[in-house]
Amino acid sequence: MSTYVFDQAWQKERDRLTALESLYDGASRRLLDGLGLTTGWRCLEVGSGAGGIAIWLADRVGEAGHVLATDLDTRFLDVHGRANLEVRTHNIVSDPLDEAAFDLIHARAVVEHLADREQVVKRLATALRPGGWLLIEEVDFGGATAGMLAEYVSAPERQRLAMERIYVAVSNVFSAIGADPSYGRRLVGVLADAGLAHIAAELHAPVVTGGSEQWTRGSVEQLGQRIVATGDATAEDVKWFLAASGKADFHYLPPLMVSAWGQRDPHGS
Ligand SMILES: C[S@@+](CC[C@H](N)C(=O)[O-])C[C@H]1O[C@@H](n2cnc3c(N)ncnc32)[C@H](O)[C@@H]1O
């Protein structure tokens, strides 16, 4: 059974996914370049969503390279005729995955949704060639982070509390289905447990202006009824956030995106 919280058939899902790319692709690209990404590399983009990173990787590795973009549901990825970009409908938990095949594997906002997360990270580490890099980027908005994120809301105290209630409620929607809303903070340890070396991590946390991003907003809109059903936030809280987050004089902090990377031993088998 899939533990993915969001509905690919939701009418605004493509917009929600491209908004996620607008928010984080710049930071992801910088980190991917920093790992030495170059022409000829073989890359795996796991849970490629709307495909922004997969397409960018394909252009970076050139004709001599290859990018495999996988997703449970590939409906939003259009390769625009790129011969070096292969799209595969694939469940990263259970479908076959070649071992020692990739110079670079990237997954963003995917592993947090999987039930057997640590096992999947170990699978990804095994799919790296010796010397290959794994970059995983996952959110953190649960637990104590919910209150911290809400502190960045540019609104009176009572609205900060509404923001915190919404983050707590969404984190409980995640937890209830088996996803981890704080997986980002666990990544360094998870990569170490997967046997990778040269592990490092950083957080990406842009404070956004209302109306400029539709990822947090779209997520709250899509999950609206489920948020209220947790009992942690009210319908009024959701209505307030959807209205406020469309206004240019309102600022807030989306979930933290934690990026962590590690390398498979270049001299290993
Ligand atoms: C939140 S979206 C992130 C999309 C993209 N990685 C990005 O950051 O722009 C999560 C994606 O993971 C995919 N996904 C969820 N569970 C998966 C699984 N078990 N195997 C492969 N893909 C999965 C979803 O279909 C969705 O496209």
Image: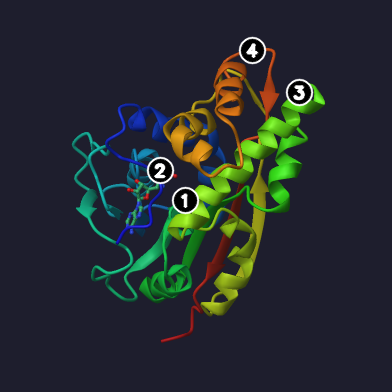
| Image depth: mark 4 or mark 3 in front | 3
Q: Pointer 4: what residue?
A: 248
Upstream in the sequence, badge 1 or badge 3?
1
The image quadrant that residue 161 belongs to is top right
Q: Is residue 197 left or right of residue 99?
A: right
Q: Pointer 3: what residue?
A: 154
Label 1 element class: strand
The image quadrant that residue 64 belongs to is bottom left
Q: Please, is residue 14 above or below residue 90 in the view?
A: above
**Residue 198 location (% of width, % of height):** 62, 71
Q: Is mark 1 within 8 Å of ligand 1?
A: yes
Foreground: 181 or 164? Answer: 164
Residue at 27% x, 39% y is 77
Upstream in the sequence, badge 3 or badge 2?
2
Q: Is the N terminus in the top left, top right, bottom left or bottom right quadrant?
A: bottom left
- Amino acid at circle 4: Ala
**Label 2 to label 1: alpha-carbon separation:** 10 Å
Q: Which mark is residue 199?
A: none
